[in-house]
Amino acid sequence: MTDISQFTGELLKSMGLFLPETTLIITFLVAIMADLISGKKHFAGYVVMAGLLVTAFFLMRQTGIESASFAGLLVIDPFGQFIKFIVLITTLLVIMFSFISKELHHSHAKLGEYYILMTGMVIGMFLLASSANLIMIYIAIETMSISSYILAGYTKEVKRSTEASLKYVIFGAVSSGIMLYGMSILFGLTGSLSLLEINTFLMNNSVESITLLLSGIMILAGFGYKISAVPFHFWTPDVYEGSPITITALLSVASKAAGFAVILRFFKVVFSAGLGSENVAWSIIGSIDWHFVIAVLAVLTMTLGNLVALWQTNMKRMLAYSSIAHAGYMLMAVAVLDNTGVAAVLIYFFMYMIMNLGAFLVVQLVADKLDSESIDIFNGLGYRSPLIAAVFTLFLISLTGLPPTAGFIGKLYVFSSVVNAGYLWLAVIGVLNSVISLYYYVRVIRNMYLRDIESTQPKLTFSVSALALVMLLAIPTLILGLYFSPVIEWANASIAIFTGH
């Protein structure tokens, strides 16, 4: 009888901790019903927005909690809470982008399924940010991926959209298969699926280093696919180009946030021999130098992303390779494998979210007006729409990492964490990559202010709601470059990754 009451008590406690995800599931179901009942195009979108705001309320109430739930399948901690807020803010902004997207309006009479699938994707990302079990990680990734596969090909009458969706599914299936094989090897070595139990086994027993390395790299390949790390990035340019711009923006931020969350949690819980203080690197179990493995991945990712971006003529493809490069910068901080590295990733992500979504919004607005995504359509934009051109310049400067923008603060903390950990060579490569990125960002700025400036092309005008959305992202991009203490304090308060030790 005691066992049943104890089980019931644990279940009720877990359900209490699961309130944000429960709210999302209810939102998903209500949005389906709302779409069936209402004939309005964006009604489901408003329902989803309301659900996300309620989710944010329950998520805020979990501040400071560190606890396992559902027998250790999920954990609630400040780190997961930060990532979930990134996902929520990104999704809310992308829904607002969708309301004014000409691309989506022309493609579909109703957009209910679009908003419903977006909710499904958020559920998967929430689960992934809290997963502490190998099977739970896989289920969360698949929950997130299935929705994103469909959303990537949502404008199905566009040939490249169907191609993007198909490539995404194929590469996704391959990466999931590799990751599952790596998980099966790790399960075979340790006899457990729980990250904490795997850590305990590795601390108390010796295992074959080559097998463990192979397993770790296979699992890292699955995670690397979600964050577009080289060499698992092949899907990114085609999917980003073929997807609706709104979905490209969502994938470039929210999906990456969930991917980085699971990478940091996996390495912290599985391969860390101790919690470590704020400035001390995590003591890594065994003889495998995971610092070096991740550092090499970071170098490959940011270098290839920046070099290939130089040759792009399509804005979405250029921003796709740019996002690959930014994943490389964040992997630099992950390679440090200490709490300052975790804080640097969180700070960078918040800044990256604002400036990257802003850049995609400007591309969406201009592409909707001119029916093209070529870099050449930005020629003379400084004279055709001075405000939009000025704001886009701000976003591009921030993406480069120049002061006084939010992007500069993000890179400053990433490079500081790398230098403090003694990886000077990695910081030098990061700075060189930032210099390379300056070229392709400045090329767009040059086109806006120095190309076709004497043409008789008409002025571009945008709706008040579109301009308000742009300014909603532009103002923080500038302010956070000057006053960034709140974000730093929030990130430092969110570095606690619950290990159960």
Image (cartoon, rainbow, N blue to C red):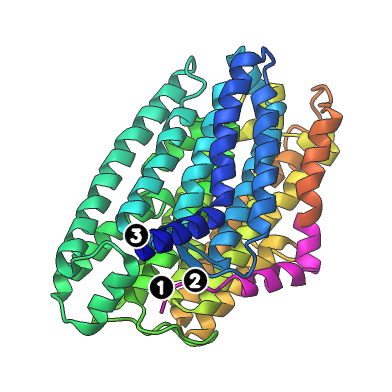
Number of residues whose C-alpha sits closer than 10 Å to that of mark 3, classed few (under 14), some (14–19) or many (20 or more): many
| Total numbered badges shown on the rendered structure | 3
In the image, which residues are magenta? 477-501
Q: Does any portion of residue 418 appear in the rendered image?
A: yes
Check residue 288 for magenta coloring.
Answer: no
Q: Is residue 317 left or right of residue 86?
A: left
- Asked whether disc 1 touches disc 2, contact meaning CB atoms under 8 Å apart, the reply is yes
Q: Does any portion of residue 371 appear in the rendered image?
A: no
**Which tag is nearer the camera, tag 1 or tag 3?**
3
SS for callout 2: loop
SS for callout 1: helix
| Separation (CA) of disc 1 from disc 2 | 8 Å
Residue at the spot of label 3: 133
Residue 105, given in percent of the width and then of the height, sits at: 65, 18
SS for callout 3: loop
Number of residues whose C-alpha sits closer than 10 Å to that of mark 1, classed few (under 14), some (14–19) or many (20 or more): many
Residue at the spot of label 2: 497
Amino acid on which the number 2 mark rests in the picture? Ile
Q: Residue at x 73, y 45 (%)?
A: 392
Q: Which mark is residue 48?
A: none
Residue 224, given in percent of the width and then of the height, sits at: 37, 55
Residue 336, given in percent of the width and then of the height, sits at: 45, 77
Residue at the spot of label 1: 268
Q: Earlier in the sequence, mark 3 or mark 2?
A: 3
Q: Residue at x 47, y 31 (%)?
A: 152
Q: Earlier in the sequence, mark 1 or mark 2?
A: 1
Query: In this rendering, is residue 144 above or below 396?
Result: above
Q: Residue at x 84, y 26 (%)?
A: 461
